[in-house]
Image (tube, helix red, strand yellow):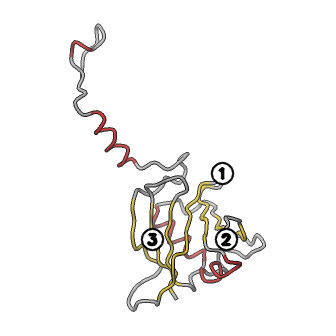
Amino acid sequence: MIYKFKASIPGSKVFMREYEVEGTTTLYEFNEFLVNDLGFSPDQMVVFRGVDKYGEMKSEYGLFDMGDGSMDEVTIERAVKKRGEVELLYIFDLKRSRCIRFDFMETSEELPRISYPRLVAEKGRNPEQFAKGYEDFDQIGESFSENMEGTAIDEDELPENEESV
């Protein structure tokens, strides 16, 4: 069985990813895929948290067993079916509690000759793992250039003894 997730960053309207993952994939294997896909440092601590439809954390999965199982023994299927957890939070910056939210969308049959997990759709840049927040510089650049059109500085507008470069 294949599980489809929509990934987003809380508070960002720019970042979106869709992933398909086999139900037998462990959270650790999914973490390795995400590290490669998002360009994160592989030597950092991460945690998955299972959240129910009311936004309450029901379980926590780390590299070490925190009472709900460790990432290398808990499968995607087990995490989704456990206690009605419809959302997984992937905490990739524990210091700042920055995360990517994975909303369970649907299940489907496995397609032949397809390698899982896989990225199906994407929008926005990958988040910087250790930045203070998510910024999509392409979007910032577009709005900056739109706002700056026709605002060239004339020589006579410069302060005294200053020249344009």
Residue farthest along the right direction in this orientation: 67
- Choose between 45 and 14: the one closer to the eye: 14
Q: Quadrant of residue 149?
A: top left
- Residue 157 locus on image (x, y percent): 26, 14
Callout 3 secondary element: strand
- Choose between 154 and 164: the one closer to the eye: 154
- Choose between 156 and 150: the one closer to the eye: 150
Q: How many numbered tags mark residues here?
A: 3
Local packing at callout 1 (Cα closer than 10 Å; few below 14, some 14-19, many 20+) is: few
Local packing at callout 2 (Cα closer than 10 Å; few below 14, some 14-19, many 20+) is: some
Quadrant where the C terminus is found in the figure: top left
Q: Amino acid at mark 2?
A: Asp
Dot 1 corresponds to which residue?
A: 95
- Residue 58 locus on image (x, y percent): 72, 70
What label sits on residue 3 in the rendered view?
none
Q: Amino acid at mark 1?
A: Lys
Mark closer to the chain start, 2 or 3:
3
Callout 2 secondary element: loop
Q: Name the mark nearer the viewer: 3 or 1.
A: 3
Q: Amino acid at mark 3?
A: Glu
Mark closer to the chain start, 3 or 1:
3
Callout 1 secondary element: loop
Residue 86 placement, left or right of 34: right
Residue 38 placement, left or right of 31: left
Dot 2 corresponds to which residue?
A: 52
What label sits on residue 18 in the rendered view?
3
Mark 1 to mark 2 CA distance (whole Å): 24 Å
Residue farthest along the front direction in this orientation: 54
User: 92 above or below 50?
Assistant: above
